[in-house]
Image (spheres, rainbow, N blue to C red):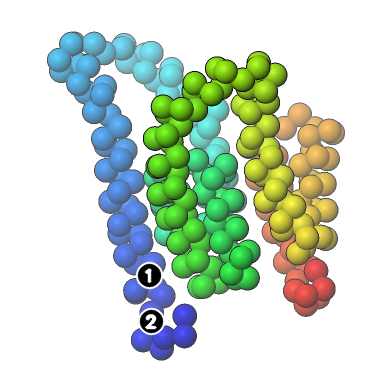
Amino acid sequence: MSDKNFNMDKDWRAPAIKLGMITLLLASVLSFLPVIYLYLVHGVIPPVSLMLKSWGMIALLFGAFYIVEPVSYYAVLGLAGTYMSFLSGNISNLRLPCAAMALDVTETEPGTKEAEVVSTLGIAGSIITNLIGVTLAAFIGTALIRVFPPVIANAFRTYTVPAIFGAVFGQFAIKYPKLAIVGFAIPVGLRLFTTLPVWVLIAASVLGTIAVAKLIFSRETPASV
């Protein structure tokens, strides 16, 4: 970002917002095409009451994540990376770890202008790789899972995502051990001593860790955290 002619807001964020809004809105509209086809061609449509009931159930289960996830992931994904990640999916188990690893190997500080570009490149690479991998997995992965003994197949389904999160957590815990203790203690404590829903635990963990990080960094240099 040493180019004096480069304007972050004009040359990076504005095009990212414009293109991101277009692609996400287009994807939202296109997702209704199968439903429209069933109605126009076959006359199949559920009752309005059933549609509202289904929508309400989904909103209760996942509505909070519309706020929690963008806030939680933004520091690592960046603006353009957030649009790309929410369009392509697999955020927690693929986009976020790839963006975090890109920042780590390039020794880029999260939340900076450089991080915005680096994380976007990491996410773009993950999307291309993921597209190839998913295509292969569609033909090979399912067959392999069927060959594996049930205990191994269930282990893949159960522990893959936690293992990825654990690796990312360990990666940052080495650099910021004090924040790692806080980030681990908040959700564990809330889980053990409260009955709060998962989305509240996530929000409390993210916002709580941010608050403690701000307090620590205001008193100490980053090198001592």
Please tell me in which quadrant of the rendered image residue 223 appears.
Answer: bottom right
- Marker disc for residue 22: none
On the image, the x and y values in percent for residue 144 come to 54, 23
Q: Residue at the bottom extreme?
A: 4
Q: Is residue 53 visible?
A: yes
Task: Report the amino acid beneath label 2.
Answer: Phe
What residue lies at 60% left-to-right and 58% top-to-bottom? 101
Please tell me in which quadrant of the rendered image residue 18 appears.
Answer: bottom left
Q: Secondary structure at mark 2?
A: loop
- Marker disc for residue 12: 1
On the image, the x and y values in percent for residue 206 come to 67, 51
Q: Is residue 55 left or right of residue 42?
A: right
Task: Report the amino acid beneath label 1.
Answer: Trp
What residue lies at 70% left-to-right and 19% top-to-bottom? 151
On the image, the x and y values in percent for residue 211 come to 72, 60
What residue lies at 39% left-to-right and 73% top-to-bottom? 9
Q: Are marks 1 and 2 in contact (CB under 8 Å)?
A: yes
| Label 1 vs 2, first from the N-terminus | 2
Residue 149 vertical placement versus 62 (above, below)? above
Q: Secondary structure at mark 1?
A: helix
What residue lies at 34% left-to-right and 54% top-to-bottom? 20
Q: Residues within 10 Å of mark 2 (few under 14, many from 20)?
A: few
Q: Is residue 71 visible?
A: no
Q: Is residue 31 left or right of residue 60?
A: left
Residue topped by disc 2: 6
